[in-house]
Image: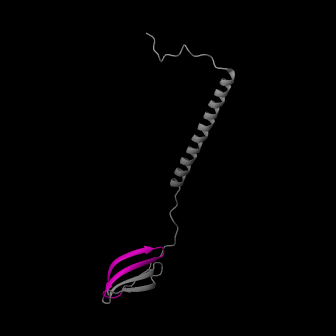
Amino acid sequence: MADRFDDKDDDEPLDPAVERIQQRLRRLILVSGGTLAIGVLAVLFAVVWRVMHLQPSKGATWTATIELPAGATMVASDVDGDRVAVTLDGADGRAIQVYELSTGRLVGRTVLIAR
């Protein structure tokens, strides 16, 4: 009983024109695959290079002291760039004060009043 999927004996030689087209397609696939592989390797190399050569930020080091009002309790704080917003509970109610981080200078103050 013959295998119906066994078509090894049924292959006829290809026409020379079809053979040339087949060779061109093989070359095209090899060149495209090689180019893609080189591109992927270049991207991976660039990522690894950047990770291995990271430089720590060289920003200026500074120290500042921020004086809070006497008797005030700090509830929360939030940093945004070179400023810090501090939420305080004090004798006059809850207030938000904004300071410059590098100098400790008070930029603004907002008192929250319940009505």
Q: Report the residue that reaches farthest toward the top.
A: 1
Q: Residue at x 51, y 54 (%)?
A: 51
Question: Is 75 inside the magenta-drawn segment?
Answer: yes
Q: Residue at x 52, y 61 (%)?
A: 55
| Secondary structure predominantly adopted by residues drawn in magenta | strand
Toward the viewer: 26 or 57? 26
Please provide percent x and percent y for residue 3: 45, 14
- In the rendered view, how is the structure colored? one colour
114 sits to left or right of 22: left
Q: Residue at x 51, y 65 (%)?
A: 57
Quadrant placement of the C terminus: bottom left
Toward the viewer: 113 or 39? 113
Please provide percent x and percent y for residue 52: 51, 53
Toward the viewer: 101 or 43? 43
Q: Within the image, what quadrant is residue 30 found in?
A: top right
Tell me which segment is drawn in magenta: 69-90
